[in-house]
Image (cartoon, rainbow, N blue to C red):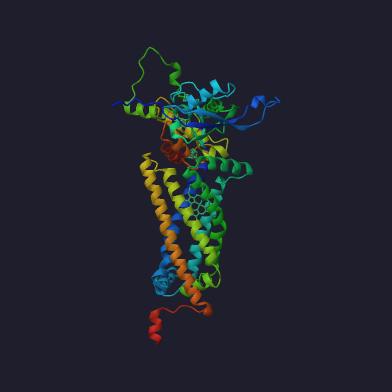
Amino acid sequence: MNRKLNLWPARLDLLQSLSGLALVVFVWCHMFFESSILLGKDAMLWVTKMFEGEHFFGEPYPLLVSAIAGIIFLLVALHAILALRKFPSSYRQYHRFHLHMNGLHHSDTTLWYLQVITGFLLFFLASTHLYTVLVQPDNIGPYASSDRIWSGRFWIMYALLLLSAHLHAGAGAYRLAMKWGPASLTGSKAARHKLKTAMWCIIGFFLILGAASLATYMKLGYDHRDHIGERYMPSSHQVQQE
Amino acid sequence: MNNIPLAEEHRMLQIQILRHNPSALLCDSDKGSHLQTFEVEEALGMTLFIALNEIREEQDPSLQFDFVCRAGICGSCGMIINGRPGLACRTLTKDLPDVIVLAPLPGFELIGDLSVNTGKWMRGMSEHLETWVHNQELEEINIDVIEERMEPRLAEQIYELERCIECGCCIAACGTTQMREEFVGAAGLNQIARFRLDPRDKRSDADYYELIGNDAGVFGCMTLLGCEDMCPKNLPLATQIAFLRRRMAMTTG
Ligand code: HEM
Ligand code: SF4
Ligand code: SF4
Ligand code: FES
């Protein structure tokens, strides 16, 4: 038959999900790098240097960090512009959704609304964080980050980012599994229930991991508040100097 | 042993009904929409169908609501029961608290009180999605010849989806349809899934894409799963929607 289908609705839906999936994978991996501070300042320094390519090229290239931040920024922008289509867009739509949600008491409906709210917050929070990394890629490290978090008062933003990003990512991953299969493949309520329990466990795990790391950075920043700007020397160096 | 229950104490149910009669708006007796409370004594095995009929017979003959089969087959008694859509004839009062709030299904044309015109919506959806077998050959069919055989497994699969009674609960349970009138809802998507299975329907995936390959169709669904959780016939709606989404995303034209 001679006709042209408009394939854009399919592509946009797929892209929305793929960009979301890529961001979820990134955010979850990111947590393990970020929480390296829990293993000590040397561990975090090692991770920092890995991202700057020092372990591979022999010297640091902070621009690599900028590049990663740039790519994530583009992914967030792509995902946001696609997901924006789903936001309620008028007073009437908000009103009807609220009426609906408040009467229904249905957890997946409420979970979607939570995703809309956290998604909206992420516009600002993710942008702030990514911009910092983008323009100050060399300003990351055990002391540099801790100073920014404590003396620079970034901890407020990071606490909100942690909460919104993980609620959003966890709920998003669950929705992806239901939206495309595999979880909806069997139609089994038990499988869905398990998936949802797993979602809350994952969210809980990352929130605890993130909160512990943030507290560690805050403590380091507090102790270091009189030496802002001073960089951390790896303990192997310190030993050699003595 | 005597197991025959003696006269028990029955609950007094407070049934609050959202009353509104659009056609009587001009009468001066009309109070607009308001909640009216009726008291009904619960009986053993009482359904909302029984309770509502008691109210209409004994307390207020002007109360409007729909019933035909009172057995969960005709799909006419869908309503909002304490915030959630469900079939009144299949809802036992013993599963509900003392205060029961009833409202008409949102998203449909209101006829009056609890009666809504789901038929009009379903017909519109059906015409829009062309939910009938498309097959040129069938137009010249010789009815003296025995129909082609169908695998029992396939027939069962089709029958599973055919069970939809068009009650409208999935439409009322879906935040997307509540926000966006043009969305065909789970009932519509389920119909497409049903005809797609049917070997007598000669439409291709590209044909189906033309009908649901947009934001009023399968890509509009935001996976809120209200439909899946509130369909009184327990249709596998999430499975069908995810399946259609994959097929439609893979359609190339
Ligand atoms: C500016 C930032 C963001 C905004 C405005 C935003 C907004 C949204 C909205 C409204 C939805 C629901 C869409 C729907 O129901 O179809 C959504 C889904 C999703 N989001 Fe985000 N989001 C943002 C950032 C992120 C980030 C950083 C991640 C990863 C951690 C993420 C992962 C996801 C996933 C996996 C989904 C499900 C995708 C889908 O349903 O196709 N989002 N987002
Ligand atoms: S899919 Fe279920 S809830 Fe929707 S109209 Fe059919 S029977 Fe009713
Ligand atoms: S999954 Fe959600 S959005 Fe999709 S049709 Fe069902 S209730 Fe509506
Ligand atoms: S009266 Fe027919 S479904 Fe309830």
Q: Would you place residue A149 above or below residue B110 in this image?
A: below
How many labels were placed on the picture?
0
| Residue B188 visible to the viewer | no
Return the x and y of residue B28 as percentages of the image width and height.
71, 26
Return the x and y of residue A49 as percentages of the image width and height.
43, 72
Image quarter in which the C terminus of chain A is found: bottom left
Q: Nearer the viewer, residue B9 or A217?
A: B9
Q: Nearer the viewer, residue B36 or A37?
A: B36
Q: Nearer the viewer, residue A116 or B204?
A: A116
Quarter of the image holding residue B241? top left
Return the x and y of residue B209 as percentages of the image width and height.
49, 35
Quarter of the image holding residue A182? top left
Name, please, the residue furthest toward the bottom: A242
Q: Which residue occupies 37% across, 47% down?
A: A194
Name, please, the residue furthest toward the left: B1
Q: Which residue occupies 48% across, 78% down?
A: A231
Q: Which residue occupies 40% across, 13% down?
A: B143
| Residue A209 visible to the viewer | yes
Please indicate whether residue A113 sits to the left or right of residue B247 in the image.
Answer: right
Q: Nearer the viewer, residue B169 or A80?
A: B169
Return the x and y of residue A202 as percentages of the image width and height.
40, 55
Q: Would you place residue A22 above or below residue A13 in this image?
A: below
Q: Would you place residue B186 above or below residue A11 in this image?
A: above
